[in-house]
Amino acid sequence: MTASSGENSAERKSSLSGFAPLEAVLFDVDGTLCDSDPLHYFTFREMLQEINFNGGVPITEKFFSEKLSGKHNEDMALVLFPDDIEGGMKFLADKEAVFRRLAPERLKAVNGLYKMKKWVEDHGLKRAAVTNAPRENAELIISILGLTDFFEALIIGSECEHPKPHPDPYLKALEALKVSKDHTFVFEDSVSGIKAGVAAGLPVVGLTTGNPEHALVEANPTLLLKDYNDPKLWAALEELESAGKAVA
């Protein structure tokens, strides 16, 4: 499937109006609240080269996007160090520590995030952050972005029975907020995350902040956006509001 045909497919499915009246919005963290993938890629590339991974040849952005982005640390350890998972987990713990050290100066919100935040608050909706990132990373990112008081729940993949791409983290979020999947939607930026939301029976709005559009389309998002300023998002939200008033 080409990117252009994928975009047409995404637009044909772009209505959120069937989920009115809306009760909650769920957000992934990395790549969805902030464009953190470039920092993750930089950290991986530098640290893997230091240990002579792949013969010292730096990993490519394509390798990062396809093999690592959005995945849980245990899955990444399996990709990078299939013969030494324990050593792989230690490497990843060190990598996450370096990421956290660099994050405060390098992370910025995805364009339009605070506009979306205000819309959610103005409509009195419940909200949770749902991520495969380690809790320390997620809490730091949310704090850097000034969103600690915005989220009512933080769901961590490793604290569920199965992380994304399994539906468990999103199902746990619905339970934590006491809302219905029929009146909730998700913002995600990775194939793994979109698959998790879809598997949980939720409509997923995909953001192309760090992953190729064609890959995201294949995970079946309801809508695909550049960022929170994308006119397609606000048209869909306007339709959703109109549908909610009709239901009321």
Image (tube, rainbow, N blue to C red):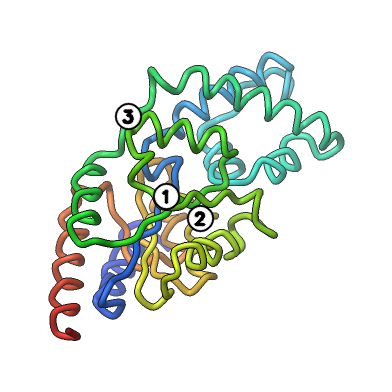
Residue 147 sits in which quadrant? Answer: top left
Amino acid type, residue under disc 1 in the picture: Asp
Marked residue nearer the N-terminal end (3 or 2): 3
Instruction: Label 1, secondary structure: give it.
Output: loop
The residue at which mark 2 appears reads as 193
| Residue beneath disc 1 | 189
12 shown above or below 38: below
The residue labelled by disc 3 is 108
The answer to whether mark 3 and mark 2 are in CB contact below 8 A is: no
Give amino acid for label 3.
Lys
Local crowd at mark 3 within 10 Å, few (<14), some, or many (≥20)?
A: some
Q: Eyeballing the image, is 193 above or below 42?
A: below
Residue 188 placed where, x, y %? 42, 53
In this image, 174 relative to 15: left or right?
right
Give the SS element for disc 2.
Answer: helix
Is residue 140 left or right of 156 when viewed as pictured?
A: left
